[in-house]
Image (cartoon, rainbow, N blue to C red):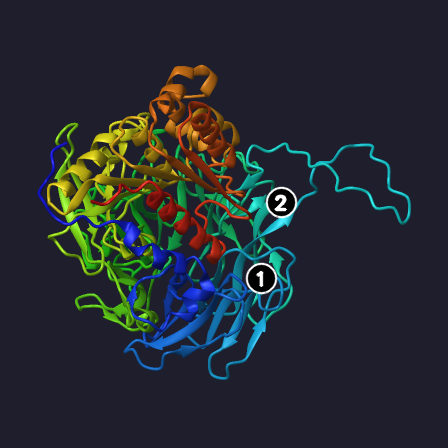
Amino acid sequence: MSARRSSTRFSPWLVATLALLCASPTAAAQTGAESGPLRMGDIFDLEIAADPQISPDGRSVVYARQRADIMTDSRFSNLWIVGADGSGHRPLTTGDFSDGSPRWSPDGTRLAFISNRGGDAQIHVRWMDTGETSAITNVTEPPRSFAWSPDGAQIAFGKLVPEPAPTIAGMPAPPEGAEWAEPAQVVERLVYRFDQLGDLPHGFVHVFVVPAEGGSPRQITSGDVHWGGNGIGGAHVSWTPDGMDLVMSRDPRGGDTESVFVADTEVFEVSVADGTATRLTDRRGPDDLPIVSPDGRHIAYFGMDDRFQGYQLTQLYVMNRDGSDPRSISAGLDREVYNATWAPDGSGLYALYDDEGMTKLALFGPEDDGSGHRVLTENVGGVARAYAGADYSVAGDGSFAMNYTTPAIPSEIAAGRPGSDVRVLTGINDDLFAKRDIGEVEEIWYESSHDGRPIQGWIIKPPGFDPSREYPLILEIHGGPFSNYGARFDLEKQLMAAQGYVVLYTNPRGSTSYGEEFGNLIHHAYPGDDFYDLMSGIDAVIDQGYVDEDQLYVVGGSGGGVLTAWLVGRTDRFRAAVSWYPVINWYSFVLTADMSASGVKYWFPGLPWDHVEHYESRSLLSVVENVTTPTRIVTGEEDYRTPMSESEQYFKALKLLGVETSLVRFPGEPHGIRRRPSHHIGKMLSTLEWFRRYAATTS
C-alpha cells in the first residue's frame, strides 16, 4: 500500500519502560502518586458504583461500591449512601466483604441487602435510624434476589432446595479411619456446570418468605422445577399490593437445567398462603420478569414469540391481572427494552434500552406501542467497559437514581426526575483521574465495503495525541456476538491507548442497538460479512492520516476472539493478533460449552452431525491454513463458556502449521479473566507484550 505522507513514526517500543514498570502491581502502586497516562496498577485503584437504590422519599441513594484489594488480590463491595443533592456521602458498611443488592423497605426505615460478612451469604436488614444490622436468614444455600412485601413485614426470596446427586450404586463404605479418594461425579444433566459458577448443585430453586425481623423461612413453591427464573441466576418475584400473592415465572414443562438457554417460560401468580399457582401466559417463547402495577390491576413483563433466530427483540408487555389482553407497549421502537419499573402512580413504566451504543432511560405509556415513549436521560451505565451495564431505581415521587458513565467517566451515581437534567452525586474515581491523563474518544461512522451499510465506531487517541505523527492502531472487537459497544468508559481500551496506540472499536453487523434486522444479518452466518465491516473501519481511520499502515494489530474477546481469528484467517494486514477466549470449532463448542442448547437452537439450523458442512464452514479451522499473522490465545482455565479446549485446538493448529503462536492460561479464571485483579493485569500485559514483540522497526 502507498505511504500516506512523510511524518515521524511513533512506536509502542518507546513506552516499553513504562510497560515493564506496570508489570509489577507493587511498583505501580509505589509510583501511583506520579501523574501521567493510565498504568496497569490502576486496575487495583478503579472503583465501580453499582445497583443504586433511591429511598422511597427520594432523599437518599444507597449503592454498592466495588473495589479491588492489592494485598489479597480480591474484589470486595460495601454499601454507601449519598443524599439526592450530593451531600452526606458516606459508607454504611465496611470491611473486606461482598455487600450488595441493597433494597429499601417500603416505608424507608430499613435497608435489606445480601452479604457474606457472617461467612455464608445471607439476607441482612439494617435499621436506618440506629444503624443496627442483623442477618435475618441462616440458610445453607445462598439467597437469590429478594423483594419486600408491601407492608414491610416479610421478605420473599429464592434459594436452591438441594436434591441428592446421582452416585455409583453399591459402593462399599470405607473402614473406620480410612481415607479414600474423592468419589466419582455422575453427570446426567445437559447443563451440569456453568461459567462463573463451576459445577452446579443438584436441586431446584424455590421461593420462600421470611419475617423481616428474622425467623424461619417458609417455602411457598414446590415441584421439580425452578421458580422465578432458570435456576442459574436470581429468582425474580413481585408482590401483589395486598401481600396475598407473588407473581413470578417458570418453565411450565418442569425439569432441571435442560432449558437454561431455551427461551420458554410463563408467568404465574402464586398464593403466599398455600402455594397455589395460576398460569397467566401461554405461548412458545419467554414471558419473564413480571412486575405488578401499584393498583394491582395489571402486570408488566418481558417476552417475545420465539422464532429461533440468533437475535430477537424482547418486548415490554402489559396484561390484565388475570392474564387477559396482553399487549406490547414497545413494539414500535425496534430496540430491545429491559429492566422495567412501574411509575409510582401506575401511569407508565420506566425502562432501559440501547440505541446506537447509548443506554437510555425512558418512560413508556401502558396503552402505547413504544413509538411514543419519552426519553428521560442517557449515559446510563458504568462497568468500566464499553459494553452496556445499567442500573437504576425509582422513588415514590417519580425521581430516579442511576449509574452514570461517559467515555471519560467510568462509573458514578446520578439522580434526576422526569423533565429535569440528571445530577452526578459522587466522584469515587476523582482521586485517580486527578493524576491520570486519558485518551480522547471520538465517534466515527463509515460505510461497509460489503454492502454500504453505515457502521458506527469509536476511536481512542493516545494521551498527548499529535495529529502530525503516525501511530500504531489496535482494532478491539466486542463479544456476544449480540451485544454493543458504545460511548462508555472502557478501562482496557484506555490502557491500550496509554501505551501509545490509537484504538478502534466498532459495532459490526450483528451488534445490538440498531434494530432486529441489523442484528440478524449474522443469523446462521457468523462469522461472515462482519469481516468487511471491521476492515472498512480500519481503512476509515487510516484515511484520517495519523495511523501507520504497517503497524496494525487486532484483539477481541469471546465473540471478538472468534472474529480476531476470522480476520487473520482472511487477511495478512495485521502484524500481530491476540484472541481472548475464542470459539474455534463450532462442532466441539456445542458439545462442551455451558450454552450448548442455545448454540444448537438459535445459532445453527440444528445438530452438528445433521449440518456438518454448516458447522465446519463457520469454524475458524476452515481458514486456519491461511494464517500467517503471529497470534496469541489467552483463556481462563475455568472458562466454561468458551472452554479451554477451543483455545488448545487453535494453538495446536497454528503450531502444526508453523505459525508463531502462544497460549496463555490463567488458573482459576472464568470467561473474561477479571476474577483476580492481577490476572486482569496479566491479560492486558500479555496482549501488549505480544504486539510489541512483532512491532515494525522504526525508521
Residue 194 position within the rendered picture, expressed as x and y whole percent measured from the top left: 53, 42
**Is residue 555 rendered to the left or right of residue 144?**
left
Check disc 1 and report its element: helix, strand or loop. loop
Quarter residue 308 falls in? top left
Position of residue 343 measured from the top left corner of the image (x, y, whole percent): 29, 61
Residue 252 vertical placement versus 110 (above, below): above
Let me know if residue 398 appears in the view: no
Residue 487 falls left or right of residue 587: left
Side (left or right) of 333 relative to 176: left
Secondary structure beneath label 2: loop
Q: Which residue is mark 1?
A: 121
Q: Which residue is at a point 27% across and 69% down the rendered structure image?
A: 415
Residue 456 numbered mark, or none: none
Residue 61 visible in this rendered orientation of the protein: yes
Q: Residues within 10 Å of mark 2 (few under 14, many from 20)?
A: some
Q: Which residue is mark 2?
A: 201
Q: Nearer the viewer, residue 387 or 304?
A: 387
| Residue contact at pointers 1 and 2, CB within 8 angstroms | no
- The CA span between labels 1 and 2 is 16 Å
Q: Amino acid at mark 1?
A: Ala
Graded by Cα atoms within 10 Å as few (under 14), some (14 to 19) or many (20 or more), the crowding at tag 1 reads many
Q: Is residue 253 above or below residue 200?
A: above
**Which image quadrant: the N terminus?**
top left
Q: Which residue is drawn at the image coordinates 61% and 65% (left, top)?
A: 137
Depth check: give the residue in front, 46 or 233: 46
User: What's the residue type where badge 2 is placed?
Assistant: Pro
Q: Nearer the viewer, residue 421 or 322?
A: 421
